[in-house]
Image (cartoon, rainbow, N blue to C red):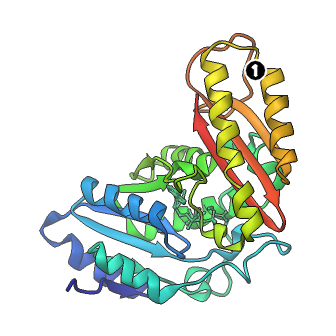
Amino acid sequence: MSRSPRIARTVSALRRELDSLRARKASIALVPTMGALHEGHISLVRLAKRRADKVVVSIFVNPTQFAPTEDFGSYPRTWKDDVAKLTAERVDLIWHPDAKAMYPDGFATRIVPEGAALAGLEDRFRPHFFGGVATVVAKLFTQCRPDVAIFGEKDYQQLRVVTQMARDLDLGVRVVGSRTVRERDGLAMSSRNVYLSADERRAAPTLHRVLKQLATRLRAGDDIKPAVRAGAAEITEAGFALDYLEVRHAETLAPLGPNESGPKRILVAAKIGTTRLIDNVAA
Ligand SMILES: Nc1ncnc2c1ncn2[C@@H]1O[C@H](COP(=O)(O)OP(=O)(O)OP(=O)(O)O)[C@@H](O)[C@H]1O
Ligand SMILES: CC(C)(CO)[C@@H](O)C(=O)[O-]
Ligand code: BAL
């Protein structure tokens, strides 16, 4: 049987645990999460293991990235299962602060990301989101001082924002993206999928199907505007309220210029019932 990972709940305990992990100059990979772990998260842990000697997973449902109208209160919390899964993966350390440990009384500093954070995608619908993410990820990086940090491509705009922040602030962390893990029918795994009713779950793979169709049309050189309109209609007909379906420059996430070449990303966000799902593919 595997040994349970060490668990730190305060910054001072974290420092002690990291000092002991770093003995003998071991390199460290950090996998930031909000818990409710699924195979997508586990794939990040496995990549982390290949990239460093020791793996730290943070589990913190960060209140500052949720608007008051969003699902912070109901966000799934499955601590015992999470620990069992990380034990099976032989993770070294779990960083599990509470809100007071992360944001002590008097906390008054925020990171305000620009660039990809203002691309007009997630930021248009969750204006508070990237400020909250950038601030907590900057804290996670300075708390854990990892050599490498692994983020999922599922949250593609987040991956771009964090990569830019690490570079701009010289945080000394190599940010690595990891491919999206999907259910057999193409739905991107997400902690929020547990909110879906049976009917909504049946409709949910439409997002990935439309993304794949668009990637094929784009690669074939088709006129993409009518294809995007048709894709948007397909998503709406499946019962979603569409927030966006857009083709963007893969790195900056800027809108495409006429005849733009180079790597592109197709991104979608849509709500079905009360659940908001996001997804994206390369093109
Ligand atoms: N299906 C997936 N494949 C690969 N990485 C993923 C997948 N889902 C989440 N991740 C990554 O796991 C990390 C932690 O994400 P988080 O804990 O928010 O999980 P989530 O499933 O994205 O939850 P949510 O439903 O809140 O979006 C992020 O870097 C995220 O991109
Ligand atoms: C990166 C992150 C852990 C910051 O709270 C969160 O946004 C997530 O789980 O993707
Ligand atoms: N998966 C990114 C975190 C969030 O949606 O709040």
State which image quarter holds ligand 3.
bottom right
Which structural element holds mark 1? helix
- The type of residue carrying mark 1 is Ile
Residue beneath the point at 44% across and 71% down: 143
| Residue carrying label 1 | 224
Quarter of the picture holding the C terminus: top right
Instruction: Tell which of 234 and 119 is nearer to you.
Output: 234
Looking at the rendering, which quadrant does residue 245 occupy?
A: top right
Does the image show residue 117? no
Does the image show residue 224? yes
Query: Quick check: 163 left or right of 175?
Result: right
Residue 43's spot in the image, x, y percent? Answer: 39, 59
Residue beneath the point at 75% across and 34% down: 246
Residue beneath the point at 32% across and 60% down: 46
Query: Quick check: 50 left or right of 283?
Result: left
Residue beneath the point at 85% across and 54% down: 239
Instruction: Tell which of 64 and 122 is nearer to you.
Output: 122
Looking at the rendering, which quadrant does residue 263 occupy?
A: top right
Residue 108's spot in the image, x, y percent? Answer: 69, 74
